[in-house]
Image (cartoon, helix red, strand yellow):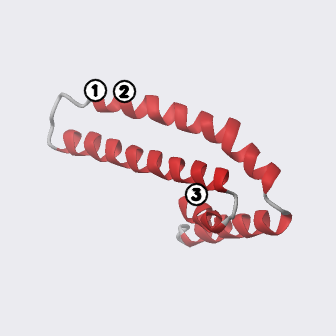
Amino acid sequence: EEKAILILTKNENKDLQSIILEILKEHDQLHDLMKNVGDKLQRGLDHYEENTSALLALMKSHVAFENTKFYPKLDRELDEKQKKLIMSKFREIILGNIAI
């Protein structure tokens, strides 16, 4: 998702750029929380619940925001060429991650 969305950062729409930057910031926060939970689980620490709760809460709000605000906005504001470029990038990324 990030690699496909980064294509859009060149978009002239400042509102869309602002949303993309916020999404990428949340992705960083999600990655950090996942790492913290993983580190604590690997070390056998019992106090990972706080990170897990924060991770779940952020994940829920993040997905809801993308599904209700971001993707509908993209659909309204991008032209067909831009949409095709993004979908092409998604396919490239997905196929590149499938071991055949």
Q: Quadrant of residue 42?
A: top left
The amino acid on which the numbered mark 3 sits, given as a three-letter code, is Glu
Residue at numbered disc 1:
49
Q: Determine the secondary structure under disc 1.
A: helix
Q: Are marks 1 and 3 in contact (CB under 8 Å)?
A: no
Q: Are marks 1 and 2 in contact (CB under 8 Å)?
A: yes
Residue at the right extreme of this rendering: 80
Nearest-to-viewer mark from 1 and 3: 3
Q: Quadrant of residue 36?
A: top left
Residue at numbered disc 2:
53
Q: How many other residues sit within 10 Å of disc 2, few (<14), some (14-19) or many (≥20)?
A: few
* Towards the viewer: 56 or 15: 15
Q: How many other residues sit within 10 Å of disc 1, few (<14), some (14-19) or many (≥20)?
A: few
Q: Quadrant of residue 94?
A: bottom right
> Which quadrant is home to the N terminus?
bottom right
The amino acid on which the numbered mark 1 sits, given as a three-letter code, is Glu
The amino acid on which the numbered mark 2 sits, given as a three-letter code, is Ser
> Which quadrant is home to the C terminus?
bottom right
Residue drawn at x 82%, y 69% as measured from the top left: 81
Gap in Å between the C-alphas at discs 3 and 2? 24 Å
Tell me: residue 26, above or below residue 64. below
Residue at numbered disc 3:
1
Marked residue nearer the N-terminal end (3 or 2): 3
